[in-house]
Amino acid sequence: MFSSITTMRRLALLLTLALLLAACGQASSGTPAASTAPAASTDATAPAVATDATAPAATDATAPAGGSDAPIRVGSKNFTEMYIMGELYAQLLEANGLTVERAFDLGATPIAHSAVVQGDIDLYPEYTSTGLLEVLKQEPISDPAELLSTLRSEYEQQFQLTWLDPSAFNNTNTFAVTKATADRLGLKTYSDLFGKAAEVRLGGPPEFPDRQDTANLETIYGATIEDFQEYSQLGTGSLRYDALKNGDVDAIVAFGTDGRIRADELVLLDDDKSAYPTYNVAPVVRNDLLARTPQVSELLNKLGPLLTDEAMQTLNYQVDGPDAREPADVAREFLQASGLLP
């Protein structure tokens, strides 16, 4: 009997101890959870205690694309004048402490425009009426001030791009013939040329027949490129002039600032019905570049007044003429002579 009571008392005591230990264990295990919860809440809501790991992420999300130290990517299309213009832009920026990457020889307008819109390049030289007709697909605007205003407004709204100040030179399309051909066919004007299209072998850039300004030209002068005896795709460089000089074609599509017009003593036909608008060249620049590097606009705007028709013809001829100089060298020499390089 005594043994049974003793055993029962021991069991009761052990049960009591077990209950006490369980209660202590619950209290002990709850304390860390209670102490860590406020800390987690504080970190999540208080900017003052943001960790170093989260701070850069917030900065990167708001910084302009590329960052302030990113190289400026200068592009150009694929002919002499554009190579020279690209070098003028690039060297002027480099001379003022900016890092530049060159992406020249991009091809025709659609490729260069796509590159700057997509951010593959930051800027490139473009012609005013090319932007209006080929990119915006609008009708020609004869007034240069209205043309520039339209470009700036539409490019800002559609592409977040800025047109800086244009050049003084107007590199409009034109038609060039030798003096012998002009005398033989009686060619003085565009009207004469289109009137005798069936007798003329014409050469020029591959895209010329399909351009919007060519369609406007055809409407005004009453004949199409298909009406010519033949049309030879001769690119935008010296090949056109070589073909004309060698008698392979009778007339070529020329650009007003081509250096070989004067060097080869060619005759430029008169646009007697004013079909062609103006083609001044200007830097087309991404807005995010101007936001992070605002001095770009001030620097590049210095070039416009210096680039006259005569100046650009001379620069082009130094590259395309017998000396066959490099565009980079020609650009550097011009910038130095203009006082824009140290």
Image (cartoon, rainbow, N blue to C red):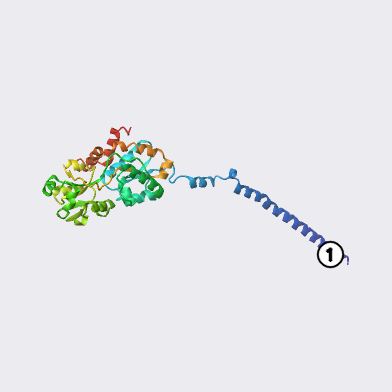
Question: Which quarter of the picture shows residue 316?
Answer: top left
Pick the front one: 84 or 49: 84
Give the residue at x 31% y 38%: 304
Q: Position of residue 326 (x, y in %)?
A: 25, 41
97 lies above or below 4:
above
Q: Position of residue 3 (x, y in %)?
A: 86, 65
> How many marks on residues?
1
Give the residue at x 67% y 49%: 35
200 lies above or below 305:
below
Q: Position of residue 33 (x, y in %)?
A: 67, 53
93 lies above or below 133:
above
Q: Position of residue 5 (x, y in %)?
A: 86, 65
Residue 226 seen: yes
Q: Which residue is mark 1?
A: 8
Pick the front one: 194 or 173: 194
Kind of residue at disc 1: Met
Give the residue at x 25% y 37%: 311
Question: Which quarter of the picture shows residue 100?
Answer: top left
Give the residue at x 28% y 33%: 337
Pick the front one: 299 or 145: 145
Pick the front one: 51 or 287: 287
| Mark 1 burial class by Cα count in 10 Å: few <14, some 14-19, many 20+ | few
